Amino acid sequence: MKPRAKKFLSYYKPYKKLFFTDMICALLVAMISLIYPMIVRYITNTVLINYEIHDAVKVIIKLATVMVGLAIIELLCNFYVAYQGHMMGAHMEYDMRNEIFTHYQKLSFNYFDNQKTGQLMTHITNDLFDITELCHHGPEDIVISLIKFFGAFIILVRIEWKLTLILFIFLPVMGFFTYVMKNRMNKAFRKNRECIGDINAQIEDNLSGIRVVKSFANETKEIEKFQEGNSRFVESKRNAYWQMATFHSGLSLFTNLINVAVIVGGGLLIATSGIALSDMLTFLLYVSNIIEPVKKLINFTEQFQNGITGFSRFMEVLETEPDIVDEPVAVELTDVSGEITLTDVAFRYQDTTSDVFKNINLTVPAGEYVALVGSSGVGKTTLCSLIPRFYDVTNGSITIDGKDIRKIKLKSLREHIGIVQQDVYLFAGTVADNIRYGKLDATMEEIVEAAKNANAHEFIESLPDGYNTYIGQRGIKLSGGQKQRLSIARVFLKNPPILIFDEATSALDNESEKVVQESLEKLAKNRTTFVIAHRLSTIKNARNIIVLTDDGIGEQGTHEQLMQQHGIYASLYEMGFRTT
């Protein structure tokens, strides 16, 4: 069995009892539908001809009771199939969604750097819906259709094989037509899915940046861009619907031709006494049992194309191996002092040929405050991203207290590193929820203490509901300085021995910067700290200033020492760090 097919079937395993019960109900529904025409044939061929009126009425009443009983059984089975069958699909969708979301969490920045958020959301929403519809309806439709089809075929052959042969002449042609259209529909629906993902990505991008759009009064431009993407989506739909319309209308033609063939053939056989009128009536009733499964299989084919396309995209994500994982010998990081050593470190992004930087050799003693400066694009943020292994070094090694970070468990490594970024991300929720993100089991007293250390307690108390104030997605209801102080409080609560400040004050006004800087200095006390410098105030207390260039570390020393060298740092300083 192919790995993807095996994977698909594995989602049924936790619900196999429910699945088999569902299939039994579907089987009963199909079998009951085959019984009704036989009862009609028995009444017309036997009861009405061979019984006296009084006896015939009794028999018909008994048969009516049987049919009512069958109808009740069919009702219960249909209800079970519709309710429990769909619930099975919902549970399978739940399992798949958990799996793909969990897998997203394992993937590194390299993966997300090359993906659109809208496409990733499509995998976890639209694609999964189509997959689970296939998981639920697919087996039911196949069982019901095959039982009805072959059951009706056997009965029809017993009634009149010549007329049955006429009917089945059309089936090979219908099968060939379906095969040809299947591949065309598969390509069309796959393209359609890609276009939906692109639109989702465009909407997400626009709504996330709506304030930038409005600040530049570019709403018209954004509408035009969206209309272009939306037009591509319509064109992809046009192709998909063209293939679908061709498929449906073609099969409808075959269905009508089958009816015509049965009516003409049956009429000729009756005229030549080849078939009884009652058998002709039964035959026509069973023809519907042949045609209905064909229609159901048509719908299944369309459903299969949607589902299998979604599953293919779903598996493409799951088959993407995380490029940063724990090594088998990885250990927990304990008793951290915070000494960090970079030896011959070089780094380049995936699918690029040139290094961002190379030949980085640096030792940072435990508790030291180090500033990184350099021209834009030289890799300051990237260098700091190597320490928590958001990316892995291309060459060389990084150690913490002498331990290679690749030999440390990722979770343990990152638990000992706190990061304060320029672009603060706050989750939709309350102030307390966002601070607690630094320590999920923190008490309210610990949260308040962390906020006080971050100079955030005062403004939090002034909010409408204090720590229970809902701040909106990305903290949109707060100022830049307030958001930054909440992110610092989060790190205070985490209490890591190693800190990274990634231009944490560069986007703030002077007054906010002063308050945030005080918080950062308090946080950095007695911790190994890397500061990506944007302004002089950020690095004035640094014991060591590292000047990065494309070829590695260009200069290193205190502010006074570097100014005396009249080199790169002095030039940057004279320009007021405008290029950083």
Image (cartoon, rainbow, N blue to C red):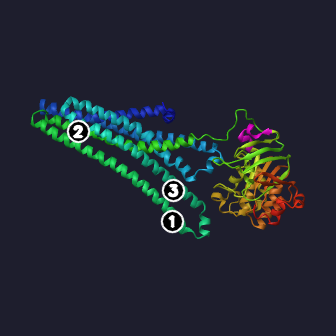
SS of the residue under disc 3: helix
In front: label 1 or label 2: 1
Residue at (48%, 46%) from the top-left corner?
A: 129
Q: Residue 476, percent across and down?
A: 65, 61
> Of marks 1 and 2, which one's residue comes earlier in the chain?
1
Tell me: residue 334, above or below residue 449.
Answer: above
> Of marks 3 and 1, which one's residue comes earlier in the chain?
3
Chief secondary structure of the magenta span?
helix
- Image-quadrant location for residue 164: top left
Residue pointed to by mark 3: 199
Give neighbour class at mark 1: few <14, some 14-19, many 20+ (Cα, 10 Å).
few
Name the amino acid, label 1. Answer: Glu
Tell me: residue 313, above or below residue 433.
Answer: above
> Of marks 2 and 3, which one's residue comes earlier in the chain?
3
SS of the residue under disc 2: helix
Q: How many marks?
A: 3
Instruction: Find the distance from the CA under tag 3 to the CA under tag 1.
Output: 13 Å
Instruction: Find the distance from the CA under tag 1 to the CA under tag 2.
Output: 56 Å
Residue at (70%, 33%) from the top-left corner?
A: 328
Give neighbour class at mark 2: few <14, some 14-19, many 20+ (Cα, 10 Å).
some
Residue 386 inside the magenta-drawn segment:
no
SS of the residue under disc 1: helix
Name the amino acid, label 3. Answer: Ile
- Residue toward you, 410 or 135: 410
Residue pointed to by mark 2: 285
On screen, residue 276 versus residue 222, left or right, reads left
Name the amino acid, label 2. Answer: Leu
In front: label 2 or label 3: 3
Residue pointed to by mark 1: 224
Which mark identifies residue 7?
A: none
On screen, residue 284 versus residue 215, left or right, reads left
Tell me: residue 224, above or below residue 313.
Answer: below
